[in-house]
Amino acid sequence: MGARVAVVGGGISGLAAAWELSRAAQDLTISVLEGAERVGGKLRLAEVAGHLVDVGPESVLARRPEALTLICELGLATEVIHPAPVGASIVSRGRRWPMPRGTLMGVPSDPDSVRGLLTDAEVGRLIAETLTPPIHHDVPLGAFIEQRLGAAVTDRIVEPLLAGVYAGHSRSLSLEMAVPALHRAARDGIPVLEAARAAAAAASDARGPDTPVFASLRSGVGSLPLALTRRLRERGVEVRTGTTVRELRAVDGGWVLVSGPTIDEVEELFDAVVLATPAAPTARLLRTVAPRAAQALASIEYASVAIVTIAIDSSRGELAALADSSGFLVPPAESLTIKAATFTSTKWPALHEHFPETTFVRASIGRHREEATLQRPDEELAAAALADLATVLGQPLPDPVAVHVQRWGGGLPQYAVGHRLVVDRARAGLVPGLGLGGAAYDGVGIPACVGSGRAAARRVLAHLPD
C-alpha cells in the first residue's frame, strides 16, 4: 500500500492540491477532509428565483493560466464563457464615470483617460508625478501612490479597485504583494506612470487587443469544485465533508489528524498533510508541530463581506442603465453602503440566454475592519443595496422577485505591509511532510489559489518516497 496523504480543507485550493496529488507517479491514498457540509469554500452556487447562480466569485482572471489550465484538465474547456465587451464604471462625486482602460491597479497609463473621474487639478497633479528615492522595503500601496500621484488617485481609483479584490483599504495593504510591478518601480526609482504604460503594453501584446481579461463557466464558477470533486472521486480520492480536523500531531513515521466531536474522536495516520484552510485554523493546527509557522499565520487578518443577489422579472422592462454596462465600483469616499455592483445578466450573455426571463444584479458590501456594516439583518442589507442602486442609477429597480444574501465571514485575507515576510516565515517554519496552500499566501484570486494548492501538493510529494 502506498503513502497516505491528507488534504485538510475542501475549498478550491485544497481540491486543486488533491488533483495534483492524484496525478503523481507515486502510489498514494488521498483523503480530502472538509469541515463544512459541502466542498468549494467561497465558490458557491445558490438558488435565486429558481435558478442556480454564483453567490461567491463569479469569474476567474483569464490572463493567469492556473484556473483555465485546471478547467481544461477536467475536460470543461467547451464550458468556458467570457463577459460581454461592455465597460464598467466608477462612482465619483455622485455620478458614474467610465472605468479607465489600461490601468495598473488604478494607476492610469493615460492620464487623460481619468478626466472627469478626477478634476483637472487632480489630473495635473497626477501628470506631475513626484519621484521618490528608491524604496528597498515594503510600504503601504495607497500611501505610496498618494505620495507619487496625489491623494485623488488613491481615493478615487485605487481604493475601489482594491476593495473589489481584497475588501481592504489601500493605505494598509502591501505594495509588494498587491501590485508587484509598482513595487519594482518603487525599488528602481522608476515613475509609476511609466510602469503603468509598460504593463498596459505588455498585457496588450500578450493577450491581443480582443482577448477577454475574465472567464467563467456556463454553469457558474461555483460548479468548478463540484466537477473537480466528481473527477477526484473517479480517481479514487476520498472527499469527506462534515469532517472538522481539530488537532495535528507528529508521530514516528507521519502525522495524526484528530477529527470528530471530543466525545467521539477519530484519529487517522498520514504520511504527509496539505493544510488548505484559512490562516487562523491553520495556525491552531500548527501550534505544537510548527510554532514559528503558527505564530506567523496567526497575525494575518481577514475581511468579511456580503453578496446581495437581486433577481428581477425581465418582462417588467429592462433599465437602460443595466443594458450597456457590466456594473460599477464605489470608493469609500462616497456615502454609500455597497462597494460594488455587477449587472450580471448584462455582463454574462450566456446567463441571460439561459435565464432570459430573469435579470440578475448583485451588490457587494463590507470592507476590512468595517464589520459593523454587516451586523444587520439580511433584509436591511438587501434594502440598503437596493437604495444605493437606485441612487447611483438615478431610478429604482423594479421590485425584485427574489433576493439572496450570502455572508462570507472572514472571507478575504488582508495582505498587510510586510505580508511576504510573514508568508516566508510560515513556510520556513514548516517541517518536511507538511504543505500550505490557499488565499493567505500568494494571491486571493481563483487562479492564485489553484496554483497555491498545487504547489503545496508538490512540496509534500517531494518528501514522499518514489
Image (cartoon, grey):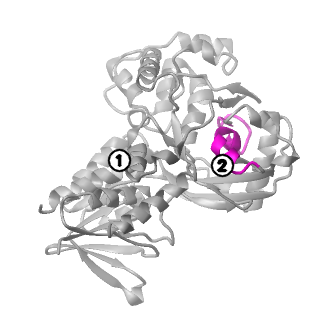
Secondary structure of residue under mark 1: helix
User: From the image, which quarter does the C terminus lie in?
Assistant: bottom left
Q: With 383 as the anchor, is 107 left or right in this view?
A: left
Q: Quadrant of residue 397?
A: top right
Q: Residue at x 43, y 84 (%)?
A: 261
Q: Which residues are magenta?
A: 328-356
Q: Residue at x 74, y 38 (%)?
A: 335
Q: Residues within 10 Å of mark 2 (few under 14, many from 20)?
A: many
Q: Residue at x 18, y 62 (%)?
A: 26
Q: CA distance from mark 2 to mark 1?
A: 28 Å
333 to 380, vertically: above or below: above
Residue 299 visible? yes
Q: Dot 2 corresponds to which residue? A: 365
Secondary structure of residue under mark 2: strand
Q: Amino acid at mark 2?
A: Ile
Q: Amino acid at mark 1?
A: Gly
Q: Dot 1 corresponds to which residue? A: 451
User: From the image, which quarter does the N terminus lie in?
Assistant: bottom left
Whether the magenta-drawn stretch holds residue 389 is answered as no
First in sequence: mark 2 vs mark 1: 2
Residue 210 in the image, given as x and y percentages of width and height:
53, 25
In the picture as drawn, the residue positioned furthest to the left comes out as 465
